[in-house]
Amino acid sequence: MLTLLESSGFGTFLADNLQTFWAFTGFANATWGHMAMIVAGLFFLFMGIAKKWEPMLLVPIGFGILIGNIPFFPGLDIGIYEEGSVLNYLYFGVLKGVYPPLIFLGIGAMTDFSALLSNPKLMAVGAAAQAGIFGAYILALALGFPANEAGAIAIIGGADGPTAIFLASKLAPQYLGAIAIAAYSYMALVPLIQPPVMRMLTSKKERLIRMPSPRPVSQTEKILFPIVGFLLTCFIVPSALPLLGMLLLGNLLKECGVTKRLATTAGGPLIDIVTILIGLTVGASTQATTFLTWQSIAIFFLGAASFFVATFFGVSFVKFLNLFLKDGNKINPLIGNAGVSAVPAAARVSQEVGLRYDKTNHLLMHAMGPNVAGVIGSAVAAGVLLGFLG
C-alpha cells in the first residue's frame, strides 16, 4: 500500500503541502526581533493590568504590539505597512494626524480649567515645563538627527501622546511608531520618573508650603476662556490650529451649558473609540522588521532625558517664582512637575508626593492648574516646531 501511494506521488504531494503550510506559519517567519517585541508587548500588558499604570493606554498599545509582531509571509496584505490591509486603513488616522485632534476634542470636553483661571500665574509653570521639549531638540540635533526629525522627537518631552503623534506624522513619519511608543510609555511612567527629581530639587520647608484655596470661577469666565484662548493662541501660532481648536471646542461644549449631549459624546464614547484605535495601531506599528533600529533606541533615551528636563524646569521655575511672592501666596514647588501634559497623572504625582510630607496638604486641585496649562503649552510648542520645520 505504501509503495502504491509513493508511486502515485501522494507522498510527494503531501510533503509539498506541509512544506508550504509551514512556510506560511509564524514559526517559519519569526526572527529574534519579533520575539523581543512580543516580550515588550507582554510587559506593557503586565504594567497596564497588574500594576494599573495607565491601563487605558498600555493595554491597547501592548496588545497592538503583539498584533504587529506576529510573523507572517510577505504579500498576504495583513500587515500594518502593507497597502490595502485592514490595519493599514486603521493606521491612516495616525499617519495623517486624524486621531490626535479627536483625542483633544475629548480631552477638552473632560477638562475643567477652573484651577488655572483662579490662579493664572500657573500658566507660566506649564510653559516652563515645555523646556523639556526644546532641551530634547538640542540633544537630538547633537546626536545627528536632521532638524525636522529632531523636532518630532523633542515633542516627547511634552508628555502628550496625541501631540507627539500629530507632530511626528508631519515631520518624521518614518519614526512615528518609535516616537508614539516612547511618548505613551513615559506618560505611564510619570509616577516613577518624576518623584526623585521633585525630592532632589526641594527642601522640606518648601514641600510643606500650603497654598491658599482657589478662588471661585464664574460661569462667564469658563465660557469666555476657550473662545478668547483659542483666538489668542491660534493667531500667534496658527500651526497649532488642529489641536488647540479641537481642545478648546471640546471645553466650550462642556462649559456653555447648552450642548451637554455633545460634550458627553466627545468626552465619553468618542474619545474611548479613538483611544482604542490609536493605541492598537500605534502598538502594531512596532513591527520588528521596520521598528528595531538604533534610531528607535536613541529616541527612547532622548524621551527619558526630555522628561527629566521638563520636570527639572517645572519645579525650578516655581522656586524662582517664589522669590517674588509674599508669604501666604507662595506656590508649593511640588506642583511644578505637573507642567507636563500628562493629565491627570502628573497632578496625581504632585498630590502623592505632597501627602508623604504632610497628610493634610492636598495639592491636587492646585496641580491641575499647571497640568492643564501643559496641555495647551505642548500644543503651542508643537505648532511652533511645525511652523519652523514643517
Image (cartoon, helix red, strand yellow):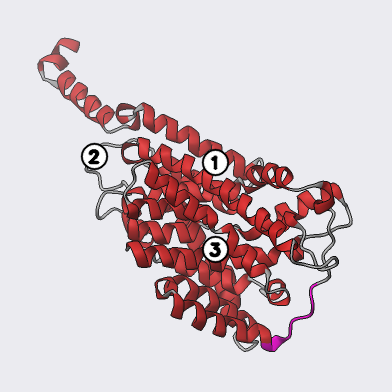
Q: Is residue 247 magenta?
A: no
On the image, numbered disc 1 is attached to which residue?
44
Measure the C-alpha gap from mark 1 to mark 3: 19 Å
Which residues are drawn in magenta?
Answer: 214-220
On the image, numbered disc 2 is attached to which residue?
74
Above or below 175: residue 224: below
Work out which quarter of the rendered image holds the N terminus and state it: top left
Circle 2 crowding by C-alpha within 10 Å: few under 14, some 14–19, many from 20:
few
Above or below 129: residue 66: above
Q: Name the magenta segment's main secondary structure.
A: loop
- Is disc 3 placed on a helix, strand or loop? helix
Above or below 185: residue 226: below
**Picture residue at 54% right of the left edge, 59% below the top:** 130
Residue 118 drawn at (x, y percent):
73, 76
| Callout 3 amino acid | Asp
> Which residue is nearer to you in this view: 330 or 264?
330
